[in-house]
Image (tube, rainbow, N blue to C red):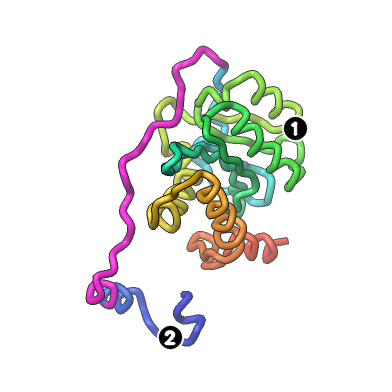
Amino acid sequence: MELKEVGLAVGERRVGRLMKINGIKPVRTRRHKVTTDSHHRLGVAANWLDGDFAADAPNRKWAGDITYIWTSEGWLYLAVILDLHSGRVVGWAVSDRMKKDLAIRALDMAVRLRQPPEGCLFHSDRGSQYCSYDYQKKLQAYGLRPSMSGKGNCYDNASVETFFKSLKAELIWRQSWPTRRQAEAAIFQYINGFYNTRRRHSYLGGISPLAFEAKVA
């Protein structure tokens, strides 16, 4: 679609053939690092999302999760929140430690940006960060309805996992990161300068999340 927009009449097969001739290969998924600490006695919410990632309007369904990025200084942890209507990243935060305040900062950012109505569903895994008393208290204060994935089922939060996969294949795995600050700056640029604003999403008809939201507004 990008090539056609600049006037090059090509299809997927031709692009694939040219990639093969020139030795261009896609970035493959790497070994998974478990970041979910579900071995706790904290309260767990029911799975109200139940695998239905479609939302007919903004701020009806949100989903959040945490992933990791390796730097020469050590791990950098990234928490994000997506609006499932458009797939737009509406909140995010980074830290060198995977504590509950990381997830809370991402939530605070999302609420400041979107001002969701009472009853907006917030879906996450069963990690201790999301099950903590402080996080659940925040959800209640913001009027968000908690929902959690089934035990050990990553597919219950597939939308956020897909975002993490795109982030890592399109940015993180393409180079090494000497410092956490460099990685953070690159992630900021990826989310705000590309993923939300320019990246084409097939499930949105080939337009970006911001363009999709403007279209249906």
The residue beneath circle 1 is 142
The residue beneath circle 2 is 8
Image position, residue 2 (x, y; %):
48, 75
Q: Is residue 159 left or right of residue 196?
A: left
> Is 208 inside the magenta-drawn segment?
no
Q: Looking at the rendering, in which quadrant would you find the C terminus?
A: bottom right
> How packed is label 2: few (under 14 Cα within 10 Å), some, or many (20 or more)?
few
Q: Hey, which residue is sitting farthest top in the picture?
A: 41
Prevailing SS of the magenta stretch? loop
> How packed is label 1: few (under 14 Cα within 10 Å), some, or many (20 or more)?
some
* Quadrant of residue 103 within the rendered picture: top right
Question: Which residue is found at the position 67% from the left and 66% from the top?
Answer: 215
Q: Which mark is residue 45?
A: none
Range covered by the magenta-colored residues: 18-42
- Picture layout, residue 141 above or below residue 217: above
Among numbered discs 1 and 2, the one appearing first in the sequence: 2
| Amino acid type for the residue under numbered disc 2 | Leu
* Quadrant of residue 150 within the rendered picture: top left
Q: Is residue 192 left or right of residue 25?
A: right
Quick one: SS at disc 1? helix
| Amino acid type for the residue under numbered disc 1 | Tyr
Q: Is residue 82 left or right of residue 9?
A: right
Image position, residue 192 (x, y; %):
61, 57
